[in-house]
Image (tube, helix red, strand yellow):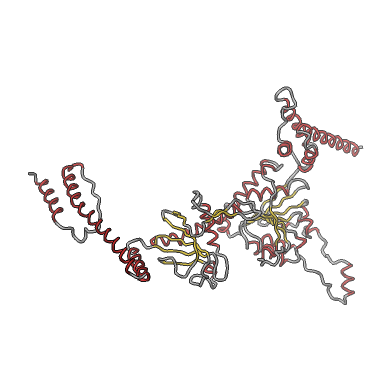
C-alpha cells in the first residue's frame, strides 16, 4: 500500500474516533475536495455524514426541551419573574450579535425649537428609501403650494438605507426615557449652538423622533459622513421643491405670529414670470455668453473662497426703455432657480437700514435695483458744481439763528457702494446684484468699476434674430398652409415678409417692445397679417425719416 494512502487513511480514522478539541467545537469549516484525490474526499465526506447524523437528533432534543422549559416557566413563574428572565436571556443573546449604536433624532428640543435634522431625515427618507412604494407612507402637500407631494416615514414604521456599504435602519416613534438599546445619542438643534437642550438635555416624553440604528464598528462613517450626506441631500431637495419668491422691501404683517429679521424687512409674492433665455429677443452670441457666465459663477464657490472674494457677481444692464432689461432679469432668475429681491432705494431711510436689508437676504438670490439713475442722486460727481449749498439753504440757516436745519437721514452714494462691495456684501453668498439704467453715462464711475459691476451688458434695438424670436413667441413661428391651395405657399410668404422686415430693421430703429406691441395688436389675425402690419409700419417710419433728413438739408 502506498505510504501516501496509508497516511491519509490513518488521518481519517483519527478524525472519526478522536473527540473534537476545545478549539474545533462551535466552528464550521467548508472544505472543497481536491480533484486529484477524489477517493479520499468521498471517504471523508461519508465519515462526516455519519458524525452529523447524531448531532441533528441532539439539536432536535435540545429544541424540544427548550419549548417544554419555556411553557413550564410561563405557567409556573409570576409575570414579573418571567419578564425579568426574558430580559436576561435577551441580553445574553445580544452578546453573540454585533453591537449596534442608536442615534435618536428628536423633532424638537425641550424648549420647542424645531430640529432641522429631523425634517431633513424625513425629507431624505421620502425621496430615497420610500421611493420603492412601501406598504405605508405619509403624503403631504401644503395648501396652495406649487411643489410636489412630499412623502415621509409614518409613525412606528421602519425604513432601511445603505451608505457606502453600511446598512442602517430608520424607525419612527416617540421619544421616551428608556432609550433604544445599545449606545444612544440624542441630536437636537440646540446641541450645535451650545444652548441648553443639546446632548443630554431633558426631552418631553411623547415628542416624535427618528431612531437611526447601525453597526457600532461603522460609528465614524455614520456620524461623520452619513449625517452630513442626509443634510446635503435634503438641502438640495428643498431648493428643488421650493416655491420661488419675489421680495420687495416693506414690512410684512403676520397677524400676531412671530417674525424673523427677513420677514420684518421683506414682503413676498410668488415669482411666476415666464421669461427664459429661449424667449429673449436679443443677440444669440450675447445670450450664450451671459448663460455661460452664470454657470461659471454658480460652480466656482471654492474659487471665490480661495481668491479671498465674496461669492457674488454684479451685472449692470443698460439700454433704452423697451430693450428687455426686466425680461433678462427674470430669465436669469428662472435659469438659476433663484429668488428675486426687488430693492426700492427710495423707500430706504438710511445707510444702516440698507445694510439690514442686505444682511437679511438669503443665498441663491438676485438683488435688483431698477432704474438706479432715477432712484437716487448717484450721478457722476465730476460733473457737479463744486458746492451744493443753495441760497435757499443759506436763508434757512440764517432764520434758525445759525443752526443747521434738521434733515432726515437718507442713503448716500457711499452707502450704496458699501452695499455692493463693502464688508456687508459678504454676509450672504451665492448672490447676484443687478442694476439697470437708461443712462449709463450719468452714473458715478465708482459704481461701475470691476468688483462692483463685474459685467456691463448693453441691450439694443431689435434686429434680425430678435425679430424671429419674437415672431416665434407671438405668432407661432410659421405661416401655415391652411389658406393656400399649393403646399408650401404659406411658409414661402412668411419667409418673404419676415425677410423684408429684417431688412427694414437695419434702417429703422425699433425696440423689441415696439415690435411685440405690433404683434400683440394683431392677435388672432394670423402670422401673415401681423408681419404685413410690421412691414407697413417700418416702411412708413423709413419714409418719415427720409423726409425729415431732406427737410433738414434744405
Residue 171 x, y percent position in the rendering: 47, 59
Looking at the rendering, in which quadrant would you find the N terminus? top left
Residue 509 shows in the view: no
User: On the picture, is 47 further left or further right than 259?
Assistant: left
Name above or below for residue 258 compared with residue 244: below
Q: Quadrant of the C terminus?
A: top right
Drawn side of residue 174 relative to residue 62, left or right = right
Above or below 326: residue 481? above
The single residue placed furthest to the right in the displayed view is: 554
- Residue 52 on image: x %, y %: 21, 52
Residue 140, percent from left and from top: 58, 55
Left or right: where does residue 422 sit relative to residue 460? left
Q: Position of residue 134 (x, y in %)?
A: 49, 51
Compared with 288, 162 (above or below) is below
Looking at this view, name the residue that lies furthest to the front: 75
* Residue 324 appears in the picture as rendered: yes
Q: As rendered, which of 191 and 300 lies closer to the eye? A: 191
Asked which quadrant contains residue 404, the reply is: bottom right
Amino acid at each position: 500500500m502506498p505510504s501516501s494512502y496509508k497516511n491519509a487513511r490513518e488521518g481519517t480514522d483519527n478524525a472519526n474516533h478522536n473527540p473534537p478539541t476545545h478549539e474545533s467545537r462551535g466552528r464550521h469549516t467548508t472544505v472543497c475536495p481536491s480533484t486529484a484525490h477524489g477517493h479520499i474526499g468521498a471517504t471523508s465526506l461519508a465519515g462526516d455524514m455519519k458524525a452529523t447524523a447524531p448531532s441533528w437528533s441532539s439539536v432536535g432534543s435540545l429544541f424540544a426541551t427548550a419549548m417544554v422549559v419555556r411553557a413550564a416557566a410561563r405557567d409556573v413563574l409570576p409575570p414579573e419573574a418571567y419578564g425579568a428572565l426574558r430580559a436576561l436571556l435577551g441580553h445574553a443573546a445580544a452578546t453573540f450579535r454585533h453591537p449596534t449604536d442608536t442615534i435618536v433624532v428628536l423633532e424638537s428640543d425641550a424648549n420647542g425649537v424645531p430640529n432641522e435634522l429631523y425634517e431633513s431625515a424625513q425629507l431624505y427618507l421620502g425621496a430615497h428609501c420610500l421611493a420603492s412604494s412601501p406598504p405605508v407612507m405619509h403624503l403631504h402637500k401644503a395648501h396652495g403650494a406649487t411643489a410636489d407631494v412630499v412623502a415621509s416615514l409614518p409613525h412606528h414604521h421602519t425604513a432601511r438605507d445603505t451608505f457606502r456599504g453600511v446598512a442602517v435602519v430608520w424607525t419612527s416613534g416617540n421619544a421616551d426615557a428608556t432609550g433604544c438599546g445599545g449606545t444612544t445619542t440624542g441630536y437636537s438643534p440646540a446641541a450645535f449652538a451650545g444652548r441648553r437642550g443639546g446632548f443630554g438635555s431633558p426631552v418631553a416624553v411623547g415628542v416624535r423622533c427618528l431612531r437611526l440604528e447601525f453597526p457600532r464598528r461603522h460609528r465614524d462613517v455614520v456620524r461623520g459622513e452619513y449625517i452630513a450626506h442626509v443634510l446635503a441631500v435634503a438641502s438640495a431637495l428643498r431648493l428643488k421643491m421650493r416655491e420661488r419668491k419675489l421680495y420687495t422691501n416693506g414690512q410684512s404683517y403676520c397677524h400676531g405670529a412671530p417674525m424673523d429679521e427677513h420677514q420684518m424687512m421683506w414682503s413676498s409674492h410668488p415669482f411666476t414670470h415666464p421669461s427664459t433665455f429661449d424667449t429673449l429677443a436679443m443677440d444669440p452670441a450675447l445670450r450664450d455668453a451671459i448663460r455661460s457666465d452664470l454657470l461659471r459663477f454658480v460652480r466656482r464657490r471654492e474659487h471665490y473662497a480661495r481668491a479671498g472674494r465674496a461669492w457674488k457677481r454684479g451685472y449692470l444692464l443698460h439700454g433704452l426703455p423697451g430693450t428687455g432689461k426686466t425680461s433678462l432679469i427674470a430669465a436669469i432668475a428662472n435659469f438659476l432657480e433663484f429668488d428675486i429681491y426687488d430693492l426700492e432705494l427710495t423707500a430706504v431711510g438710511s445707510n444702516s437700514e440698507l445694510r439690514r436689508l442686505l444682511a437679511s437676504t438669503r443665498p441663491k438670490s438676485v438683488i435688483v435695483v431698477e432704474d438706479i439713475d432715477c432712484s437716487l442722486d448717484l450721478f457722476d460727481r465730476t460733473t457737479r458744481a463744486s458746492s451744493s449749498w443753495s441760497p435757499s439753504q443759506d436763508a434757512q440757516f440764517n432764520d434758525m439763528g445759525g443752526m443747521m436745519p434738521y434733515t432726515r437721514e437718507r442713503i448716500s452714494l457711499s452707502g450704496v457702494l458699501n452695499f455692493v462691495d463693502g464688508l456687508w456684501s459678504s454676509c450672504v453668498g451665492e448672490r447676484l446684484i443687478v442694476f439697470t439704467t437708461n443712462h449709463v453715462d450719468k452714473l458715478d464711475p465708482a459704481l461701475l468699476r470691476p468688483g462692483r459691476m463685474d459685467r456691463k451688458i448693453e441691450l439694443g434695438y431689435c434686429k434680425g434674430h430678435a425679430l424671429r424670436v419674437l415672431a416665434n413667441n407671438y405668432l407661432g413661428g410659421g405661416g401655415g398652409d391652411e389658406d393656400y391651395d399649393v403646399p408650401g405657399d404659406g411658409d414661402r410668404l412668411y419667409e418673404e415678409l419676415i425677410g423684408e422686415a429684417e431688412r427694414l430693421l437695419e434702417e429703422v430703429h425699433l425696440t423689441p417692445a415696439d415690435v411685440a406691441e405690433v404683434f400683440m395688436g394683431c392677435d388672432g389675425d394670423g402670422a401673415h397679417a401681423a408681419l404685413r402690419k410690421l412691414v407697413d409700419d417700418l416702411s412708413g417710419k423709413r419714409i418719415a425719416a427720409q423726409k425729415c433728413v431732406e427737410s433738414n438739408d434744405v
